[in-house]
Image (spheres, rainbow, N blue to C red):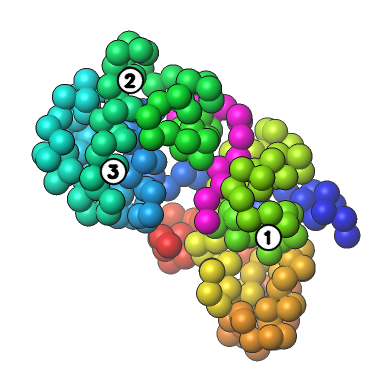
Amino acid sequence: MTTRERVAQLLKAWPKVYPNAHCELDFRNPLELLVATILSAQCTDKRVNMVTPKLFKQYRTAKDYANAPQAEFENAIKPTGFYRSKAKSIRAAMRAIAEEHNGKVPDTMEELCALPGVGRKTANVVLGNAFHKDEGIVVDTHVIRLSQRLGLTKHKDANKIEQDLMKLVPREHWTNWSHWLIWHGRRRCYARKPDCGRCEVFKLCPSGKVFLRTGKAQNPQGTTPKAFGVEGTGPLGRRNSVCAREIA
């Protein structure tokens, strides 16, 4: 199977495995998503979502963030970690939005990446989920790990991995592709001891058999996993699913 053939098969499988895959950061508008995404660096979405309800009530506009006292804002986001640098980045980005974009989050890659503290990954999250624009593919630790295990890239650098994926995945699937890989990384393809024994795309993964043979993967059933659609497998991501509530 060629790499492109593997991607084509994955594009058929992912929507069945994760029919409800979406950005797991809570937000109501582009401004909130931008803040939440910056806060999510080196932090789980679950913890960010615990902090943002109160934060979003206190700060509603770009000016609110820009004018917030540094110490006060640091204290508000402290549970997300690296709060000093995050506070500086968010306040600086909001200042630029207030002064240069009339208080509205820009909707182009160039303008977003020009904001202090905003890189391509953050810009992709905002563009794909707040503006529904497929301008790139979000590459986080899960996407890096799964792209390598699925044989879609040989690179370790996030930018190079994104370029590889953009050549393989049709543009209209770029945002969803990152959702699917992130969800699978959180629910099956863990960094340590991936759950190959229950993996719905095991037959499409060149690393799965190696992991099982070398004991680097979980296999609770003790048997070789089967492809999606047979007994014992099914869609994840339902709202009432235990797996769907896991946040890694």
Residue type, mark 1 in image: Gln
Give the residue at x 22% y 54%: 79
x and y, in percent, of residue 195 in the image: 58, 74
Distance in Å between CA atoms under marks 2 and 1: 37 Å
Q: Are marks 1 and 3 in contact (CB under 8 Å)?
A: no
Residue 85: which numbered mark, if any? 3
Q: Quadrant of residue 201?
A: bottom right
Element under disc 1: helix
Marks 2 and 3 sit apart, C-alpha to C-alpha, by 17 Å
Query: For the C terminus, which image quadrant?
Result: bottom left
Mark 3 is surrounded, within 10 Å at the Cα level, by few (under 14), some (14 to 19) or many (20 or more) other residues, namely few
Q: Is residue 216 above or below residue 157?
A: below
Q: Nearer the viewer, residue 34 or 202?
A: 34
Name the front one of labels 2 and 1: 2
Along the horizontal axis of the image, is 187 left or right of 1?
Answer: left
Q: How many marks?
A: 3
Kind of residue sitting beneath label 3: Ser
Is residue 235 visible from the viewing direction of this image? no
- Residue at the location (72% across, 54% down)? 153
Q: Bounds of the magenta span?
A: 130-141
Q: Which residue is mark 2?
A: 96
The disc, 1 or 3, on the residue closer to the chain's N-terminal end is 3
Which residue does the numbered mark 1 point to in the structure image? 148
